[in-house]
Amino acid sequence: MARWLFAGFAAVSLVVLFAWWPSPIRVSVVDNEEPVRVADLLGEETEGFKRALTPRPFAFPADHGAHPEYRHEWWYVTGNLETPSGRPYGYQFTLFRFALTPEPPQRSTAWAAQSVYLGHLAVTDIEAMRFHTRQKLSRGGALGLAGASVEPVIIWLEDWQIQGKEATHWPLRIQAQTNDLGIDITLHPEKPVVLQGDRGLSRKGPQPGNASYYY
C-alpha cells in the first residue's frame, strides 16, 4: 500500500482499485427504472465487462481516473493524525463506483446513469473511544452528480471529492462534509506509486478473474 506523509504528523494511504470478483447476488437492473439496492450492485453478472486476469501496464495520471470497462472500482484514503495538543484520530474516506451496464444508457433523460457512486466517511476519536460514520449515494454521469476525471484529477460525489492539481495531480485535497462530521485534508507524496501483488494484479482467490488491479 502506498504511503505518504501530510501536515507533518499523519501517515496516510491512497489506493485506487478497479476490479471484478464473484458475489452471491446477481444484478438484473439495466435501465434503472426500478429502485437499486446497494447489495444488488455487488452482483456477479460480468457480461460486457473486462476482468482482472493478468498484469497490465499502469499509466498515470490516467489510471487515477475511472475505468468504466470494469464492473467495480473504488478510491480510498486512510490515515492517522493528531491535533496540535496530541489528541489522536483516525480517518477513512472511500468513493466507490458500481456499474449498472457496460454501455452508456440509451435514454434521452438527463437522469440516465451508467453507474452509481457510493461514498463512505469514517472518523475514529481514539481518546473518546468513539467511531463515527456517514455515507451518501448518487447517480454517476447524470447531471454531474458524481464521476471521475483526469485533467485535473477529481473523483467526486456531489460535494465529496478527491481532487489533485492540474499539472502534477499532487497534492491531493480530500473533502467530505456533513452537518456534524467532516474532513478537509491535503496529501503530499513521500514515494512513487507502489503496485500491489503481481505487478499490480492483486488476486483474491484461485479462479481466473477473482482479482483486482491495485496500487
Image (spheres, helix red, strand yellow):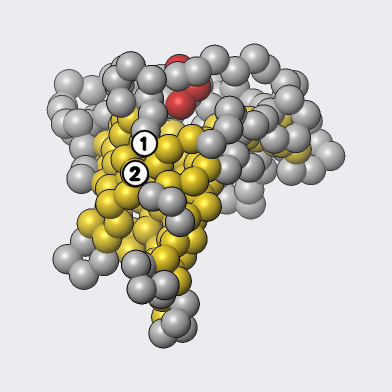
Q: Residue at x 49, y 61 (%)?
A: 80
Q: Is residue 131 visible?
A: no
Identify the residue position indicated by label 2 in the image.
186
Relative image position of residue 68 (x, y in whole percent) = 45, 24
**Front position in the image: 207 or 165:** 165
Q: Is residue 147 visible?
A: yes
Residue 58 is left or right of residue 106, and the answer is right
The three-letter code of the residue at mark 2 reads Thr
Residue 9 higher or lower than 20, as above or below: below
Describe the element under mark 1 as helix, strand or loop: strand
Name the image quarter holding the N terminus. top right
Residue 107 is left or right of residue 57, and the answer is left
Q: Residue at x 26, y 66 (%)?
A: 181
Q: List the single residue furthest toward the right.
A: 206
Residue 202 is left or right of residue 46, and the answer is right
Relative image position of residue 171 (x, y in whole percent) = 37, 33
**Front position in the image: 184 or 26:** 184
**Front position in the image: 114 or 107:** 114
The three-letter code of the residue at mark 1 reads Leu
Name the image quarter holding the C terminus. top right
The image quadrant that residue 107 belongs to is top left
Identify the residue position indicated by label 1 in the image.
172
Q: Which mark is residue 111?
A: none
**Front position in the image: 151 or 35:** 151
Q: CA distance from mark 2 to mark 1?
A: 6 Å
Relative image position of residue 189 (x, y in whole percent) = 49, 35
Q: List the single residue furthest toward the bottom.
A: 128
Q: Are marks 2 and 1 in contact (CB under 8 Å)?
A: yes
Residue 112 higher or lower than 21, as above or below: above
The image quadrant that residue 110 belongs to is top left
